[in-house]
């Protein structure tokens, strides 16, 4: 039966790599079989995914189970893989006979007569075919073990490589995060510089008016300054300063047109307000800084820091607090209100492009020094 099968399908017993009968055949996932040594040598140094040499199908892992059918189908007679070449080296020079036996004691080939010679008669001998099969099986077992260990080491190496890549990515991320934190804008309290404007005082004096103050009132802990303190201490809601006495006054003049300039000595007061407001706001009991029609410059002290604010809308002015005289200039037709540091002849801030459709009154409020 075996010989009949060989005659009908000889190609099924041939390895497509070495083109010889199978030696320890192995079947991979796609169904093709090869010699185990041939496949190991082919896949040993491959850098890409292992694939079948016949159909190129990807094989992620190797099945080392021998194909029993292929082993049984190999001819039992003298096979090509075991047949020794007929050469001078295979002929015994002493007895001129074929060396068909192997002596494991001294690892040499012997003819039949040499086996009974005095030097080998006490040794155990075996046929060359049997010795070759024995050593072949040992070599194949070692190759399988080496291959499996190599595959295991490669998997461990791949795993460690992935972990190393993850750590490298995390390292780059942490480094970038630290750099971002390093270069992120830090909270600061900038102080902008002011410049002296030559001839400004002379030009403004052409529109000087003298303000008569009236409606003086005393307020305990003015709500105007409380609103500024909350804005200045937005990060410290527990701030609760002691109540202070403030003096507020409105000018007797009402401006509905023209250009007007007046000055007020704020002395060394730490908390003060100066500017213009519409008459309806001045008559209210709850004067709020977010109301319309008020053009004020405000100074407030919280702890040991001074801050300047302007209204319409309420915003911080990052310049040094003026001490002494502060000037106020109004150009009703062009919609301009300006505040001047008289001592340094410099501009503090401007209200530009305003549209005045209501009378404006001077307003001043200051607290203790």
Image: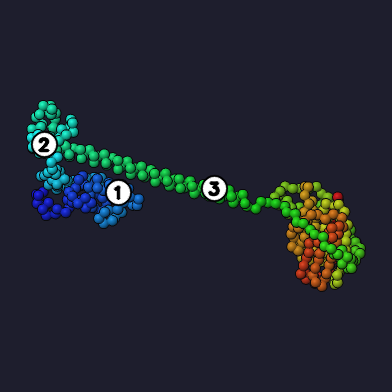
Its colouring scheme is rainbow
- The local secondary structure at tag 1 comes to helix
Instruction: Please report whichever mark, 3 or 1, sits nearer to the chain's N-terminal start.
Output: 1
Q: Nearer the viewer, residue 144 or 362?
A: 144
Q: Does 51 sit left or right of 233 as displayed?
A: left
- According to the picture, the residue beneath numbered tag 1 turns out to be 43
Q: Are marks 1 and 2 in contact (CB under 8 Å)?
A: no
- According to the picture, the residue beneath numbered tag 3 turns out to be 174
Q: Nearer the viewer, mark 3 or mark 2?
A: 2
Instruction: Please report whichever mark, 3 or 2, sits nearer to the chain's N-terminal start.
Output: 2
Q: Does 187 sit left or right of 21 as displayed?
A: right
- The local secondary structure at tag 2 comes to loop
Instruction: Please report whichever mark, 1 or 2, sits nearer to the chain's N-terminal start.
Output: 1
| Whether residue 118 can be seen here | yes
User: How many C-alpha atoms fall within 10 Å of the one at disc 2: few (<14), some, or many (≥20)?
Assistant: some
- According to the picture, the residue beneath numbered tag 2 turns out to be 92
Q: Nearer the viewer, mark 1 or mark 2?
A: 2
How many numbered badges does the structure rendering display? 3
Q: Nearer the viewer, mark 3 or mark 1?
A: 1
Q: Position of residue 333 (x, y in %)?
A: 82, 73
Q: Residue at x 8, y 35 (%)?
A: 95
| Whether residue 286 can be seen here | no
- The local secondary structure at tag 3 comes to helix
């Amino acid at each position: 039966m075996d010989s009949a099968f060989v005659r009908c399908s000889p190609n099924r017993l041939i390895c497509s790599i070495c083109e010889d009968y199978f030696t320890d055949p192995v079947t991979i996932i796609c169904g093709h079989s090869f010699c185990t040594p041939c496949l190991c040598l082919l896949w040993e140094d491959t850098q890409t995914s292992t694939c079948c040499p016949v159909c190129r199908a990807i094989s992620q892992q190797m099945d080392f189970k021998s194909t029993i059918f292929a082993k049984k189908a190999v001819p039992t007679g003298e096979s090509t893989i075991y047949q020794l070449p007929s050469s001078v080296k295979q002929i015994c020079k002493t007895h001129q006979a074929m060396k068909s036996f192997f002596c494991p004691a001294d690892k040499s080939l012997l003819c039949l007569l040499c086996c009974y010679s005095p030097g080998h008669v006490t040794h155990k001998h075996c046929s060359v075919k049997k010795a070759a099969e024995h050593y072949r099986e040992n070599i194949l077992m070692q190759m399988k073990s080496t291959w499996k260990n190599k595959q295991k080491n490669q998997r461990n190496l791949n795993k460690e490589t992935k972990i190393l890549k993850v750590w490298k990515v995390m390292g780059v991320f942490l480094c970038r995060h630290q750099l971002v934190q390093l270069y992120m804008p830090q909270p600061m309290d900038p102080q902008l510089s002011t410049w002296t404007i030559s001839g400004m005082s002379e030009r403004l004096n052409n529109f000087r008016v003298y303000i008569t103050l009236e409606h003086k009132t005393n307020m305990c802990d003015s709500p105007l300054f409380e609103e500024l303190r909350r804005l200045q201490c937005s990060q410290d809601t527990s701030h609760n300063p002691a109540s202070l006495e403030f003096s507020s006054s409105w000018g007797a003049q009402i401006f509905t047109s023209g250009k007007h300039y007046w000055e007020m000595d704020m002395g060394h007061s730490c908390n003060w307000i100066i500017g213009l407001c519409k008459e309806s706001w001045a008559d209210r009991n709850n004067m709020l800084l977010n109301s319309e029609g008020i053009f004020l410059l405000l100074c407030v002290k919280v702890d040991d820091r001074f801050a300047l604010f302007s209204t319409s809308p309420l915003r911080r002015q990052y310049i040094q607090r003026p001490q002494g005289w502060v000037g106020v200039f109004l150009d009703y037709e062009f919609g301009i209100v300006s505040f001047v540091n008289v001592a340094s002849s410099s501009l503090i801030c401007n209200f530009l492009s305003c549209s005045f459709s209501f009378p404006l009154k001077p307003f001043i409020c200051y607290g203790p020094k």
